[in-house]
Image (cartoon, grey):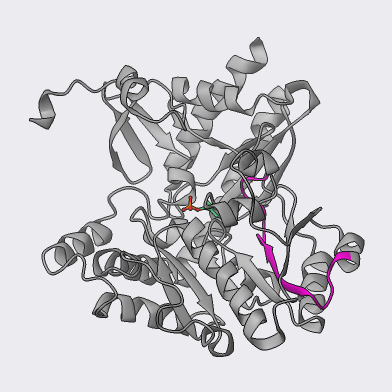
Amino acid sequence: MTESIEVNRALFDEVMVPTYNPPAMIPVRGQGSRVWDQDDHEYVDFAGGIAVSALGHCHPALVKTLTEQGNKVWHLSNVVTNEPALRLAKKLVDSTFADKVFFANSGGEANEACLKLARRYAFDTFGEQKNKIIAFNQGFHGRTFFTVTVGGQSAYSDGFGPKPGAITHIPYNDIETFKATIDDDTCAVMIEPLQGEGGIVPPTPEFIKTVRELCTQHHALLIFDEVQTGMGRTGELYAYMGLGVTPDILSSAKSLGGGIPIAAMLTTNEIAQHFKPGTHGSTYGGNPLACAIAGTVVDLINTTEVLDGVKTRERWFREGLAKINDKYHVFDEIRGKGLLLGAALNSKYEGRAREFLAAGIETGVMVLVAGANVIRFAPSLIIPREDVEEGLARFEQAVAMIAAD
Ligand SMILES: *Cc1c(COP(=O)(O)O)cnc(C)c1O
């Protein structure tokens, strides 16, 4: 009987590989933007499962799709195709630059597909010398060995033996260094159109424009990692739409499934044809259960009402955080876009972002960090105003606790 197992934080240390260090409380249910733990303490959810639960917890339309598809068929494998995958692909193609879609299960896997496709395209089209990948310091692209090596924090990729090669890292938003680095042997540039894990760092318009122009000039593919920024997070369906710069390949995950693991790589016909039957694949990728749910997520998010609502909610957060800062003087700036916002701590609180997360758990609000100096907010895109206000009030209590020390 699973119910006879006593579950508490100590069991985590006993049975889990220690890759994480969660707090003592264990959430057991969620509704909208509220979550309850084993002791029935309630939390306002400003974390959204790290920018995943874009429609909150247990949205009725998602529960309906989950139950309906759950009673039809969950999994078939890619030996056959399925209706929900084709419908979802059609919706993604119709609403983006892309002509073709490849489904995976996580952001890292979608990015792995992006990188492999870029390398294959360059190999087929220009020859094997065109293999250089340019990526950015503090960038984050996942934890597979290829994607973590392309990511811009070598601490995450060191210590696992020989790394995938021909990957160069340069500073984000540094136009001159970028110009000096890209050349005809560059096969791809992988970039987040707003750095998430790296501290909520937006690109300057000139930088992102230059990256696009030089990629085109050197026949290098521009890969936008929209795993965190995609699916409405910035107030556009994808962040590229707000930048006026279109990538050649794009990855989407996190919010795409609204909480069910699914990811997608989007690209053009010309590039897609370099993957052939057998060149790449996935057992679960595009499975009917995940695709049915993501299909409903896309239907709900890809509306002016929800996307404009993200911009309105950004304002609520910015105003609320500014008020807190007027009182307690903890932030240097609030940055980011839509509902991917970062409160950067000032020098007095440098390196202490985790303390705010922990204090929030005590006062009943879940927030995230993005590095040691930034408190990150990535709530549901449809979080109600009263939840924003209540969550900010609780966050203010957390700030007050730390500022009083
Ligand atoms: C979260 C994230 C990933 C990794 O996604 P997983 O689903 O954890 O593999 C990749 N890129 C970006 C920008 C992310 O935010």
In reply to whether residue 122 is colored magenta, the answer given is no
Badge count: 0
> In the image, is 391 to the left or to the right of 9?
right
**Can you say whether 15 is above or below 76 in the image?**
above
Instruction: Mark yes or no: residue 231 visible.
Output: no
* Quarter of the figure with residue 283: bottom left
> Can you see residue 30?
yes
Residue at image position (38%, 43%) is 33
Q: Position of residue 264 (x, y in %)?
A: 45, 69
Tell whether 218 sits left or right of 311. right
Query: Does 215 appear above or below 349?
Result: below
The quarter in which the C terminus is drawn is top right
In the rendering, at what x and y percent does residue 182 appear? 83, 70
Residue range corresponding to the magenta coloring: 181-198
Q: Is 77 in front, or is 353?
A: 77
Q: What residue is drawn where x is 54% and y is 85%?
A: 274
Decide: is 356 above or below 319. above
Residue 48: quadrant of the picture:
top left
Q: Quadrant of the N terminus?
A: top left
**Residue 183 in the image, given as x and y percentages of width and height:** 84, 74
Residue extending farthest to the top is 405
Q: Nearer the viewer, residue 79 or 338?
A: 79
Residue positioned 53% across, 59% down in the render: 227
118 sits to left or right of 55: right
Q: As rendered, which of 252 and 364 lies closer to the eye?
A: 252
Q: Main secondary structure of the magenta part?
A: loop
Residue furthest left in the image = 1
Q: Is residue 164 above or below residue 50?
A: below
Q: Position of residue 303 (x, y in %)?
A: 44, 72
Quadrant in the rendering for residue 102: bottom left
Q: Residue at x 67, y 53 (%)?
A: 195
